[in-house]
Amino acid sequence: MAEVRRIFTCKCGYKLRYGAARCGDCYAPTPFYNRTYFWRAIIVLLPLAAGTMVLVAVA
Ligand SMILES: [Zn+2]
């Protein structure tokens, strides 16, 4: 059985299920850093940003 990751806490104190769009207790929208796409975007954009910085430094 896969364990549900609960990394972040809602402002109401409820431990948010990772990737959930809304709090399971108060139904408030979860912070952007609780979404999977946010971390995927960082993983994709970070090397691109680093590559751009290297190009700017060389040029
Ligand atoms: Zn909540």
Image: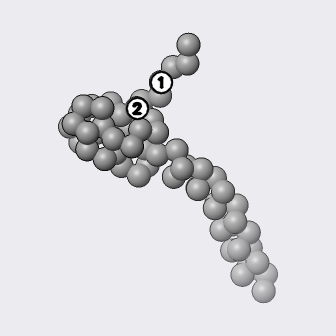
Q: Secondary structure at mark 1?
A: loop
Q: Which mark is residue 25?
A: none
Label 1 crowd (10 A; few <14 / some 14-19 / many >=20): few
| Residue at 47%, 24% in the rendered image | 4
Whether residues under marks 2 and 1 lie with C-beta atoms below 8 angstroms apart, the answer is yes
| Residue at 38%, 37% in the rendered image | 8
Q: Amino acid at mark 2?
A: Arg
Instruction: Give the labeled residue for mark 2.
Output: 17
| Residue at 59%, 50% in the rendered image | 40
- Left or right of residue 45: residue 25: left
Quarter of the rendering occupied by the C terminus: bottom right
Above or below, comparing residue 16 to residue 1 in the picture: below
Dot 2 or dot 1: first in sequence order is: 1
Above or below, comparing residue 27 to residue 44 in the picture: above
Above or below, comparing residue 23 to residue 3 in the picture: below
Q: Residue 56 occupies which quadrant of the picture?
A: bottom right
- Left or right of residue 59: residue 15: left
Q: Which mark is residue 4?
A: 1
